[in-house]
Image (cartoon, rainbow, N blue to C red):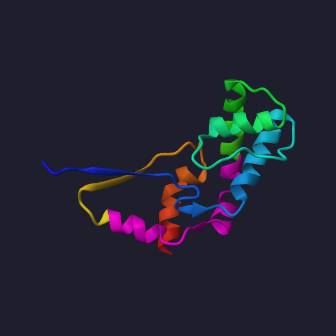
Amino acid sequence: MAVRRVVLWDIDHTLIDTRGVGRELSAQAFEQVTGVPMVKQAKIDGITEPVIFRETAKLHGLHTERKDFDRFASALTKAHLERAAELRERGHALPGAASALDALFAIPEVVQTVLTGNVGASPTNANTDFRRQASD
C-alpha cells in the first residue's frame, strides 16, 4: 500500500487575499450583532472565527457568549453571500497559489483539502471559485 500524504490548506492569506472585503464583512456582522462599530479587530492569522470574534469583542470592552458568536456567524455568512461578486472582483489568488496546488495535485500520493477556522460562505468555503480564479 502506498503512503499517502494529506496537505491541509488554509485559504485566507495563504492562497487568496480578499483585499479588505473580508474585514469589511466582519465589521458589518460585528456591528449587526453587538450594536458596536468594529474599530479594531483581533489578530486573524491562524485563529478560528470564534476566537477572532471573542477577542475583537474584548477589544471593544464587550463580553460575548457562544450564542453571540452563532449570531455573528450567521450574519457573516449572509454578508458573504450578498457580496460574493464583489469578493470575486476585489479578491485575488496569491502569487504561486495555483502552481502550488497544481504541483501537489500531480503527485498521486498527495491528497489536498481545506482546513479552516472560517464559517459559512466565507472565501474559504468558496474554494471552487478560488480554483477558477487561480487558473484564470
Residue at left 69%, top 43%?
A: 76
Task: Residue 84 in the image: state x and y as whole percent.
Answer: 65, 57
Task: Residue 31 in the image: state x and y as whole percent.
Answer: 82, 40
Number of numbered callouts drawn: 0
In the rendered structure, the answer to whether residue 80 lies left or right of residue 58 reads left
Q: On screen, 28 above or below 86?
A: above
Of all residues, the one furthest to the bottom in this rendering is 136
Task: Residue 33 in the image: state x and y as whole percent.
Answer: 79, 35
Residue at left 47%, top 64%?
A: 131
**Residue 119 lies in what quarter of the image?**
top right
Q: Along the line of sight, which residue is nearer the eye, 24 or 85?
A: 24
Q: On screen, 32 above or below 108?
A: above
In the rendered structure, the answer to whether residue 38 lies left or right of residue 127 reads right
Q: What residue range appears in magenta?
A: 79-104
Residue at left 76%, top 53%?
A: 24
Q: Name the dominant secondary structure of the magenta segment.
A: helix
Residue at left 71%, top 24%?
A: 65
Q: On screen, 100 above or below 71?
A: below
Q: On screen, 85 above or below 70?
A: below
Of all residues, the one furthest to the right in this rendering is 36
Q: Is residue 71 magenta?
A: no
Q: Along the line of sight, which residue is nearer the eye, 125 or 38?
A: 38
**Residue 63 lies in what quarter of the image?**
top right
Of all residues, the one furthest to the left in this rendering is 1
Q: Is residue 80 magenta?
A: yes
